[in-house]
Image (cartoon, rainbow, N blue to C red):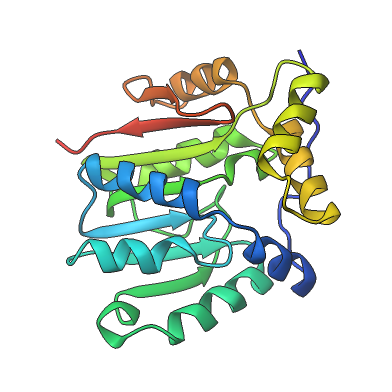
Amino acid sequence: MLERILEPEAMDTAEEAADYDAMDHSGPNADFIDRLIELGARGRMLDIGTGPGQMPPVVAARVPDAHVLGIDLAHEMLAVAERRRLALDASVRDRIEYRAADAKRLDLPDAHFDAVFSNTILHHIPEPAAFLREARRVLAPGGVLLIRDLFRPKDLETLNALVALHAANCNESQRKLFAESLHAALTPQELRVLADECGLGHAELVVDTDRHMSLQLRAH
């Protein structure tokens, strides 16, 4: 089994933000939002690790009563996200907000959000247990949780094959970023153990694709 090798927690240069935003995440993003809605997400929502803010506009457009707060540690990512928000129609724009925040120490009230979601940020967190505990703390009882991330392949050969398959049309920097992210990710087994330790033993763990897994709770 490959050892987990951490990568920087925040990509906080203008070049990194632009490079990440330019990558084609449309397919996985659409699948993620479909799942979020299928789980029953509505109302006050928190996007942890929003990056360049690709998710909140689509969520707000598809869920009429959604008010989405996107947080990120990287100010350059948030600058891209805010430019994207300002270009939206007011009916969507006014239901989105972005703030700088640390996912491991959220300055947000307990049980405040009807839905908490995060897309491919967990592998950036050196202390994933702190992230999971905070996500659980701010989620209202009966709310929706969807934490999707990459999972670490079993060996370097599999990792390289995934990069060749899914980053074939990317530039060298983007392929390197994808490979490092796979190497930094948890395995499904590691995430299951952590979730159980963090009070999320009732959450379902789903292996979604050849590289993605999700920890999820349905609205009830």
Quarter of the view holding residue 31: top left
Pinpoint residue 41: horizontal percent, then vertical percent: 24, 49
Determine the residue positioned at 74% across, 21% down: 158
Compared to residue 120, the image places residue 195 above or below, namely: above
Q: Is residue 31 left or right of residue 1?
A: left
Pinpoint residue 182: horizontal percent, then vertical percent: 71, 34
Compared to residue 68, the image places residue 125 above or below, namely: above
In the picture, the quarter occupied by the C terminus is top left
Pinpoint residue 139: horizontal percent, then vertical percent: 31, 45
Pinpoint residue 117: horizontal percent, then vertical percent: 40, 48
In the picture, the quarter occupied by the N terminus is top right
In this rendering, the count of numbered labels is: 0
Determine the residue positioned at 78% across, 17% down: 155
In this view, the residue farthest toward the left is 220
In this view, the residue farthest toward the right is 172
Compared to residue 130, the image places residue 172 above or below, namely: below
Residue toward you, 210 or 204: 210
Determine the residue positioned at 72% across, 50% down: 9
Determine the residue positioned at 31% across, 21% down: 202
